Image: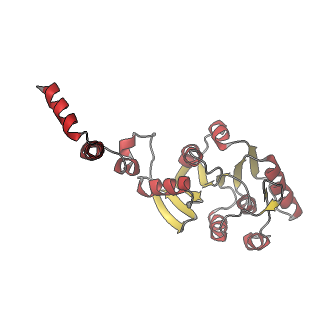
Amino acid sequence: MDVEALIAAAPAFHTTDAGEPLHIGSDPEVLRFIAAQTGPGMATLETGIGGSTVVFALSGARHTCVAYSGREIDRVRRYCEEHGIDAGGVDFRQGRSEHVLPQLDPDPLDLVFIDGSHAFPTAFLDWMYAGRRLREGGLVIVDDTQIWTGKVLRRFLIEQPGWELVHDVPYRTAMFRRTGDLGELVEWNDQPYVLRRSSTGLRRLAVRALYLVRRGELRSTVRRRRARRA
């Protein structure tokens, strides 16, 4: 089996709340991208599980899959066995990524696929713990950028030094390359995306003045401040 056969088969590794099989697959373009960028001996990691996990197994990479559901892990393993795919290089770790990722050895990675929980703040924690382990030149893939958390992470990385957008599937997935030393976690005012959207200096004063105008309190507030200074 290859990635095209997997895309055509569209296996259902997930289930509905009622327990019915459900195909929630990554975009075929994303699966093809992963297949093209990975190979034997590479170190890769994903949060979430599904067809992408099978692609990583097919690539021969040393892959870590962090998945919440043990049943989904069993389905992927069974699918690989039934189709003659060697999944021996896949290290399945069951649990929530915010609990599992900090406990993993911080070995360098070549590719990270962020496609686990899209609830706040999990996608950001996945990037912090896994994305920052990338070697220079390594790739991080942010899936489901149509969801607010993925959209914000995509926009943050576009503006953040040390990252380069190399491919984009609009309203679905963004692929970034690490281009430089990320250093230690920096302050908020060293992050362009955060700084540009924060109320600081004159902007903060303007926002505060507008708030007081709307409440009809601007003049009284100014008089009180002048009185305190006198």
Left/right of residue 76 with respect to residue 208 in the rendered view: right
Residue 187 at x, y percent in the picture: 39, 39
Name which quarter of the figure residue 38 lies in: bottom right
Task: Determine whether, in the image, residue 62 is placed left or right of residue 229.
Answer: right
The image quadrant of residue 12 is bottom right
Whole-percent x, y for residue 135 in the image? 54, 51
- Asked if 39 appears above or below 207 in the picture, the reply is below
Most extreme residue toward the front is 216
Q: Residue farthest to the right?
A: 82
The one of 14 and 189 positioned closer to us in this rendering: 14
In percent of the image, x 61 and y 40: which residue is there? 106
Q: In which quadrant of the rendered image does the C terminus lie?
A: top left
Q: Quadrant of the N terminus?
A: bottom right
Whole-percent x and y of residue 14? 78, 57
Picture residue at 19% right of the left edge, 39% below the top: 219
Residue at 82% x, 61% y is 21
**In the image shown, does 36 or 157 lie closer to the viewer?**
157
Q: Nearer the viewer, residue 160 or 120?
A: 120
- In this picture, residue 190 sits left or right of residue 76: left
The mark total stands at: 0
* Figure quadrant of residue 56: bottom right
- Does residue 5 sit above or below 190 in this rendering? below
Q: Is residue 50 above or below residue 132?
A: below
Q: Is residue 162 left or right of residue 112?
A: left
The image's colouring method is: secondary structure
Report x, y in % for residue 144: 60, 60
